[in-house]
Image (spheres, grey):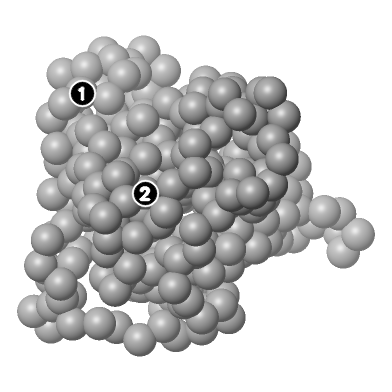
Amino acid sequence: MTNPAYDPWTGRWSAEHVTPAIGLCQRKPWGVMAPADHCVPGKPKSDTETTALEVAVVGADAPWGRFALPDESPVFLPHNYEPNYPYPLVVWLHDSEWTARELLDLVPRISPQNFLGLSIEGLTPTNRFAAGPMSPPNCLDPLDGLLETLKDVAGQMRREFHVHSERIYLAGFGDQAAVALQMMIRRPEWFAGALAFGLRSSKLDPITNYDGLRGKRVFLSAGIRDVRVSLPDQVALGRLLRSAGVNAVLRSYDAGEEPSPKLLSDINLWLMNSIYESTLV
């Protein structure tokens, strides 16, 4: 991997990068999610932890794998992680259909070394639009709550890993695809763009922050055999995003709900193109 010119941290989430810690745990199996400090060398472990956790040093010679932050948000660490390289971060929104494990298992199929992966719980269709910008002052907006959660987790991520502040992408399948787009529209200054796969609803909050959205990147995709997706709605959404200045692309694949190998390959190329384009500016 070529190391492009370093882009200084802008303090978006006010957490400066430090040398990665060695107290992160590789998860074996996925079902055991004990706090990361439970695997610190020398600390007594329970029988479950002894068989389930393996201490791994985060650094250039560490194998790629799946780790968890202290709050147990699962993380994918690239193969031959290089602490001095600012990595793009893809934040995957998981739910009952697409679990954190399934989403992070996709990352090495996209690329085993180009990106950091993080998974957080998204919003359900029932509470996604339970409140919005025009809701009463005392009404809690679930989307804002999710954004605040991500803000906290991203701060932890910055303290443990070298995240490129200008290359943070949201991603989701199905219902979470709409949530990812909604989060980017609500806080475009926090993200470089979003990836929405198999979007089932094109109903989003009204777009008002045109200046903030201009130049953001969005990857819309769907399988032509996915019966829960309307391709005309996807096309209309793509046109709407473009009218707001978003660099949106729409691609369809000979597939159903499951991501095809071609889709995974295109995701890698699309994300890497953002790096190449920025180095040419």
- Left or right, 278 with reference to 221: left
**First of labels 2, 1 by sequence position:** 2
| Pointers 2 and 1 in contact (C-beta within 8 Å) | no
Q: Does residue 201 appear in the picture of this structure?
A: no
Distance Cα–Cα, label 2 vs label 1: 23 Å
Relative to 171, residue 224 above or below: above
Q: For numbered disc 1, what is the local secondary structure?
A: loop
- Total marks shown come to 2
- Give the label, 2 or 1, closer to the camera: 2
Instruction: Specify the quadrant of the image occupied by residue 231.
Output: top left
The residue singled out by tag 2 in the image is 77
The residue singled out by tag 1 in the image is 260
- Say which amino acid is labelled 2: Leu
Of residue 273 and residue 114, the one placed in the foreground of this image is 114
User: For mark 2, does the 10 Å Cα neighbourhood hold few (<14), some (14 to 19), or many (20 or more) residues?
Assistant: many
- Left or right, 208 with reference to 7: right
